[in-house]
Amino acid sequence: MSGTTHTVTNQAPPLVGYDVFSCDRALTEAVERHLAPELLDGAREELALLGRASGSAQVREWGEQADAFPPRLRTHDRYGNRIDEVEFHPAWHRLLGRSVGAGLTDAWGRPGGHVRRAAGFLVASQPEAGHGCPVSMTHAAVPALRVEPELAAVWEPAATSHVYERELAPVAEKPGVLIGMAMTEKQGGSDVRANTTEAKASAADGEYVLTGHKWFCSAPMSDAFLVLAQAPAGLTCFLVPRVLADGSRNAFAIQRLKDKLGNRSNASAEVEFDGTTWARRVGEEGRGVRTIMDTVAATRLDCALGSAALMRQAVAQAVHHCTYREAFGGPLAEKPLMRNVLADLALESEAATVLGMRLAAAYDAVDAGGPGAERERALLRIAVPAAKFWVTKRCTPVVAEALECLGGNGYVEESGMPRLLRESPLNSVWEGSGNVQALDVVRVLRTAPEALDAFLREVGEARGADHRLDRAIRGVLVELADLEGVEARARRLAERMALVLQGSLLVRWAPPEVADAFCAGRLGGDGGSAFGTLPHTLDLRALVERARPTV
């Protein structure tokens, strides 16, 4: 064949070989803001190392492989013995080992641990989000374990270890473990009080056997699970290990793996407890919900952080593409309308990052104790469900619009954008969907006046700096003045509270052009419903430049 039919030109190079952490100005500034000066150098070094790995071609390939070759269930071995194991592609184990080794299950009690870990979670989730599920649950299990000091003495050091050990074995023989959750059942879903799994006490104190079926068991290859079951005194929390102290397998039958829209690399399963499943009680009988409250709150914050990570990656890809792609006589990023779209997307991404990192800092303040710790604890009670509601809701439209910035290329699997889009609704569904979060905000308003006080004091830190923010705060106060019929408008209230909190944080800490754009487009009524409708008089170029990843 003579000649060539075409020459490939005007294509953006792949976004690889860059430092995911150091190129994210909103994230790096948050780490500098919230960490003590003596911790900064070490944290920057750790996060930059993780950032370079996350932006490398190798780790990107692992993410693609883990998604392309999803886990498989092996119920029996070759001899017919029940083993109930899940097989993963080697890339999955490499991703998990990288994240555990970076300390992403080690935050509690470590100076600045929550800020460092939240930043690392944001970075490590960008090349592949599915492996973040067991990382998140293991991190979040620590508060529940600490309800039983004897249990925590055995399991917490292994859960917070920086060593990933994939083989199932008794906890005493493992340098590191993963902990999952099995809470929901098919008849109840988010209403865990409707659970029917039964727990019967055995002869030894604190030991029970379970009978029941769990509709969603996340990361079923984990070493142990927090499980809710009905004990004689009511709903109770239990720890169910996969392998017992004598080395035998616990009765833990994996019935099937879920075929999910996204999150393909991560296994979600239905599991059966057959009446001989050994469990150790965590907390008092009948106080299961209270026992897991802090664990659930920690996973909800991770849902917001995970969505922030997806948004950041989608925006980085869109800005990168539009920087190199030319159309109608120049780079796409220089076209006024595309610049408006990119700036609007970057604004949403930065607001999500700043909010998630502020709440991580609140966790560090609570851990450290001292003046202000109780106020920070109260703020978390109301701000976590509001942030989880709003940030996870914004993720899908952000990713969809970012995909469109790549045009037809973005709709092709090789771009990576379809994988981000399939992943984007996940965090809004897991750990309580939108209605559950909004109703939790209302519940806290009714039962914990100190939480509302902490919220108002937090947003009040920026009062007087922007008239649009001040007006939005007054609007929230009007909403709060009358809680009659509030359930029907709980989503509106949660949305407004999250937006006001984001606006307050950006006014206090972001560059003026970012805060101005947010207050105009999100609080001042100067933006439309679609992305790319910010007022043209704003400094949109600065927003796009701030979001641009440097390769």
Image (tube, helix red, strand yellow):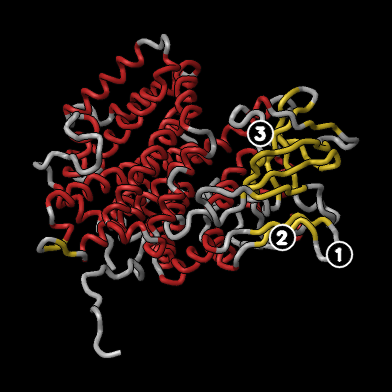
What's the residue at 30%, 57% (across, down)?
A: 316
Mark 2, residues whose alpha carbon is within 10 Å: few (<14), some, or many (≥20)? some
Residue 174: mark = 2
Residue 186: mark = 3
Above or below: residue 155 compared with residue 145 = below
Quarter occupied by residue 150? top right
Res 313 visible: yes
The image shows residue 52 at horizontal and vertical percentages of: 39, 67
Task: Mark 1 and mark 2 in contact? Answer it, CB < 8 Å.
Answer: no
Mark 1, residues whose alpha carbon is within 10 Å: few (<14), some, or many (≥20)? few
What's the residue at 42%, 40% (across, down)?
A: 392
Residue 79: mark = 1
Q: Is residue 464 left or right of residue 270?
A: left
Disc on the earlier residue, 2 or 3: 2
- Give the spatial CA distance, label 2 vs label 3: 33 Å
Q: Is residue 213 left or right of residue 499?
A: right
Between 71 and 451, the residue placed more toward the observer is: 71
Judged from this view, the residue extending furthest toward the bottom is 2
Amino acid tagged 1: Tyr
Amino acid tagged 2: Lys
Callout 2 secondary element: loop
Between 127 and 236, the residue placed more toward the observer is: 127
Judged from this view, the residue extending furthest toward the front is 1
What's the residue at 16%, 44% (across, down)?
A: 513
Callout 3 secondary element: loop
Mark 3, residues whose alpha carbon is within 10 Å: few (<14), some, or many (≥20)? some
Between 366 and 549, the residue placed more toward the observer is: 549
Q: Is residue 180 left or right of residue 512?
A: right
Task: Mark 1 and mark 3 in contact? Answer it, CB < 8 Å.
Answer: no
Quarter occupied by residue 518? top left
